[in-house]
Amino acid sequence: MKIKLAIAMLLGLAAATYQSVAAQEKSQWDGVYSEDQAKRGEPLYQEHCSSCHGADMAGGEMAPGLTGGEFAANWNELTLGQLFDRMRTSMPQNNPGSLSRQQNADVLAFMLYKGTAPAGATELATQSEVLGTIKFVGMKPEGK
């Protein structure tokens, strides 16, 4: 009986810890980029990305949209670090890896802005590990 009680208590503690960590998890809806950073990203996007992904980010003949439902569904529950690394290593298609980490972060900030994620007080990081702690959540959570 004592073992069952101990197991039940441990399971309860594990569930409470998981809920606490999940509640603290950041997403793009928590203001993870600055407005200035998104403004810096706009001309970079227009110069390096819009020819394939469209001036309005709706996508092109061979490239997917970078906002909207399909984009949100494709990236839902992944991290901004994964998105950043995809951009950093494979974009722009005609010259992969040619943008600096800062330029990629600025473009990502502009994408978040166009996707209606709110700006915050700090800039989006340029380290994949830091961005890996921020989830992309396709649907805006209630209260955000």
Image: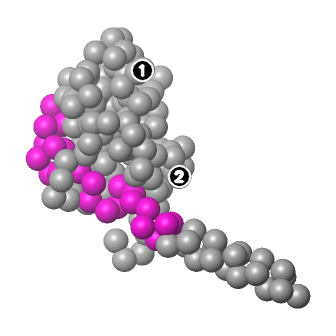
Q: Main secondary structure of the magenta part?
A: helix
Q: Residue at x 49, y 66 (%)?
A: 21
User: Residue 50 is drawn in which quadrant?
Assistant: top left
Q: Quadrant of the N terminus?
A: bottom right
Using the image as rendered, state which of residue 57 and residue 32 is in the foreground: 32
Q: Secondary structure at mark 2?
A: loop
Q: Is residue 141 above or below residue 94?
A: below
- Percent position (x, y) of residue 31? 26, 59
Q: Is residue 51 above or below residue 136?
A: above
Of all residues shown, which one is farthest toward the top? 94
Specify the amino acid type for callout 2: Glu
Q: Which residue is mark 2?
A: 77
Q: Which residue is mark 1?
A: 90
- Percent position (x, y) of residue 100? 24, 23
Tell me which segment is drawn in magenta.
21-43
Q: Residue at x 40, y 21 (%)?
A: 89
Q: Quadrant of the C terminus?
A: bottom left
Is 135 positioned to the left or the right of 104 in the image?
right
| Crowdedness near tag 1: few (<14), some (14–19) or many (≥20) residues, C-alpha within 10 Å | few
Q: Are marks 1 and 2 in contact (CB under 8 Å)?
A: no
Of all residues shown, which one is farthest toward the front? 2
